Amino acid sequence: MRSRFDYALHELPLGVLYGHDGATIEECGELLEELEGYERLADQVGHEGDRDLISKARFHIPAYRQYLEEHDRYTTYAQYLSLHSSGVRMD
């Protein structure tokens, strides 16, 4: 499971991967469901080293889904991240 999320996030800040392509809105939902299982398993076996990856996935998967839902407002996911982390609102 760790490798799946390492792979899904290895292209950041370009985006979140699902297979060989960027994740779709629906696939982000699937990844979040899988992430819940991964997090439970990491807690059960005490893998504290997985906390950083889980936190990163908890942030980027929903953020990437939001970016996809509003893709006409941004040129790239990196721009989305830059604007949202700086507090700039696009409303």
Image (cartoon, helix red, strand yellow):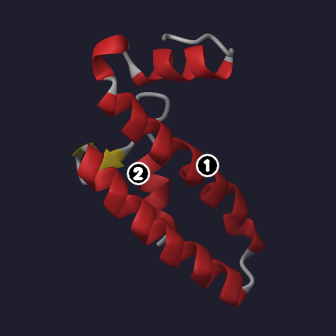
| C-alpha distance separating marks 2 and 1 | 11 Å
Q: Badge 2: how crowded within 10 Å, few (<14), some, or many (20+)?
A: many
List x then y, in percent, for residue 18. 29, 52
Mark 2 or 1, nearer chain start: 2
Nearer to us in this view, 42 or 11 = 42
List x then y, in percent, for residue 16. 39, 42
Taking the image as shown, residue 24 lies to the left or right of residue 13, namely left
* Residue occupying image coordinates x 61% and y 49%: 56
Q: Check disc 2 and report the residue beneath it.
A: 8
Q: Badge 1: how crowded within 10 Å, few (<14), some, or many (20+)?
A: some
Q: Check disc 1 and report the residue beneath it.
A: 56
Taking the image as shown, residue 60 lies to the left or right of residue 68, namely right
Taking the image as shown, residue 41 lies to the left or right of residue 19, namely right
> Is 57 placed above or below 71 here?
below
- Circle 1 — which element? helix
Residue 4 falls in image quadrant: bottom left
List x then y, in percent, for residue 49. 73, 67
Pointer 2 and pointer 1: residues touching (CB < 8 Å)? no
Name of the residue lying farthest toward the front: 91
* Residue occupying image coordinates x 39% and y 29%: 67
- Circle 2 — which element? helix
